[in-house]
Image (cartoon, rainbow, N blue to C red):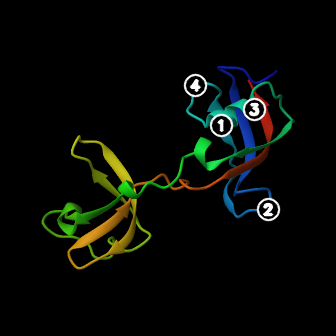
Amino acid sequence: MKITTGSKVSLIYTLRCDNSAGEIIEEATVQEPMDFTFGIDPMLEDFDNALKGLEAGQKFEVAIPCARAYGEEKEELFMELPKTKFMTDGEWDEESLMEDEIVSIESEEGEEMQGLIVEVKLNTVIVDFNHPLAGENLFFSGEVMKVN
């Protein structure tokens, strides 16, 4: 059975930066494959295009340039926020306000946003709200395990 819109797909893959020799960013394994509904679940367009028409057992490789993946990092998504934004019950936990920690913040519109703390200052915290893969060229290699 070929992958078409609505197909239930299970696959394994390795995601690397730049090319087949780049740093491994993520893996889906035989023990923990990636399962999704093709054309329904949100995927990168170039990734979908590379899989369309494949069958179980077929291997794939796809390079997705930064501009067609998650775009370049945007400076305006680095925000300096007052520490009071991170308070719970009038206090903040200094241990949770550390560099490289992921935090959730509610936007002014009430949306929950996740960001990465890049710097903690005396009264403020600088948080990066870019997608974690912004600025990266992506290279997927893998195999289709099942198509239903």
Q: Work out how far the residue at label 1 is from the one at label 2, CA to CA, in angstroms.
A: 25 Å
Q: Point out the frontmost of discs 3 and 1.
A: 3
Image point (57%, 30%), residue name: 41
What residue is pinned by disc 4? 40
- Earlier residue among tags 3 and 4: 4
Q: Amino acid at mark 2?
A: Ala
Question: Taking 94 as reference, is 66 above or below it?
Answer: above
Disc nearer the start of the sequence (2/3):
2
Residue assigned mark 1: 35
Task: Compute the Cα span from label 3 to label 4.
Answer: 14 Å
In space, the residues marked 2 and 3 are separated at their CA atoms by 21 Å
The residue pinned by badge 3 equals 51
Check if mark 2's residue and mark 3's residue have beta carbons within 8 Å: no
**Numbered mark located on residue 69 in the image:** none
Q: Secondary structure at mark 3?
A: helix
Is label 2 in a helix, a strand or a loop?
A: loop
Q: Residue, x 68% and y 48% (percent of image)?
A: 32
Instruction: Please name the amino acid that badge 1 sits on.
Output: Asp
The disc label shown at residue 21, or none: 2
Considering only order in the chain, which callout, 1 or 3, is on the residue closer to the N terminus? Answer: 1
